[in-house]
Image: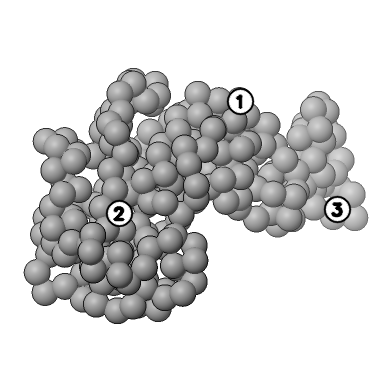
């Protein structure tokens, strides 16, 4: 898919990421990742076992986050590592291709969590963090352009997975599971571009910001009706009159 291929900047190494953060300070408390390599069509050809690591935060996790993720303050005391160590372990997991990888998340909140953790850390691996920030892609922004619900809203990761027939790897809000689900959603999207095409026709049909003559033509085309240049001109004349 050419549009997404341009976002990858030629990278064949992709790292699907999910960061969990505290409720109020948005500090990182967990990292989930899945490293894959893709072929010339953009399809996943190899993948590593998902990666998960817990990160100690300066502030409390918060009840809502604990209820969603199962991560508690006590868990972080026992299993958590420093932000520096967590990022270093992520780099080690990806390996030599780290600097030549694209880092893909579902939504922009993961980058907010990364930035917040930097602000709380006097000691962090700058090159590792910068590599992620400079090669970051929000997959939800990409797919939401072509596929929305009936009210024009983006879908959740789970609903996109359902739409593309992606089997859930496990319970939601486990960072390793969410990263794996995102990887397979990406792969299904690349392999089923025809589904995206059909969904995009629906999006265009329901788009309300086209000028009226264009909107009428788009709706006919989305309904598989042929429209001639003369018919388009007639629509313009009706609008002007």
- Going by the image, does 72 lie left or right of 117? right
Q: Nearest the camera: 146 or 90?
A: 90
**On the picture, is 124 further left or further right than 104?**
left
Residue 227 seen by the camera: no
Report helix, strand or loop for mark 1: helix
| Circle nearer the viewer, 2 or 1 | 2
Q: Pointers 3 and 2 in contact (CB under 8 A)?
A: no
**Location of residue 22 in the rendering, given as x and y in whole percent from the top left corner:** 37, 71
* Residue located at (28% from left, 43% from top): 51
Badge 1: residue crowd in 10 Å (few <14, some 14–19, many ≥20): few
Q: Is residue 237 above or below residue 71?
A: above
Observer-nearest residue: 225 or 178?
Answer: 178
Relative to residue 100, is residue 113 drawn left or right? right
Residue drawn at x 36%, y 68% as measured from the top left: 72
The mark found on residue 239 in the picture is 3
Q: Quadrant of residue 21?
A: bottom left
Question: Mark 3 or mark 2, which has the lower sequence index?
Answer: 2
Question: Could you tell me which residue is drawn at 47 percent across and 37 percent down?
Answer: 169
Is 59 placed above or below 193 here?
below
Distance, label 3 to label 2, CA atoms, is 54 Å
Q: Which residue was labeled with disc 2?
A: 31
Q: Earlier in the sequence, mark 2 or mark 1?
A: 2
Can residue 78 be seen?
yes
Report the front residue among 131 and 34. Answer: 34
Looking at the figure, which quarter contains the C terminus? bottom right
Q: Position of residue 55 (x, y in %)?
A: 24, 62
Crowding around mark 3 (Cα neighbors within 10 Å: few <14, some 14 to 19, many 20+) is few
């Amino acid at each position: 898919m050419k549009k997404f291929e341009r976002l990858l900047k030629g990278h064949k190494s992709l790292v699907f990421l999910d960061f969990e953060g505290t409720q109020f300070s948005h500090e990182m408390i967990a990292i989930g990742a899945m490293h894959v390599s893709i072929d010339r069509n953009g399809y996943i050809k190899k993948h590593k076992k998902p990666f998960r690591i817990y990160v100690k935060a300066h502030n409390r996790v918060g009840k809502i986050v604990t209820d969603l993720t199962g991560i508690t303050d006590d868990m972080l005391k026992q299993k958590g590592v420093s932000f520096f160590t967590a990022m270093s372990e992520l780099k080690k997991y990806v390996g030599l291709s780290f600097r030549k990888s694209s880092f893909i998340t579902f939504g922009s909140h993961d980058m907010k969590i990364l930035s917040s953790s930097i602000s709380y850390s006097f000691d962090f691996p700058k090159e590792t963090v910068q590599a992620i920030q400079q090669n970051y892609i929000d997959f939800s922004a990409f797919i939401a352009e072509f596929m929305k619900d009936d009210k024009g809203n983006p879908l959740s990761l789970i609903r996109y997975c359902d739409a593309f027939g992606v089997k859930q790897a496990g319970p939601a809000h486990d960072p390793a599971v969410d990263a794996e689900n995102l990887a397979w959603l990406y792969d299904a999207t690349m392999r089923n571009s025809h589904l995206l095409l059909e969904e995009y026709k629906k999006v265009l049909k329901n788009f309300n910001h086209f000028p009226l003559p264009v909107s009428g033509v788009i709706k006919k085309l989305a309904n598989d009706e042929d429209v001639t240049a003369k018919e388009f001109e007639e629509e313009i004349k009706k609008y002007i009159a």
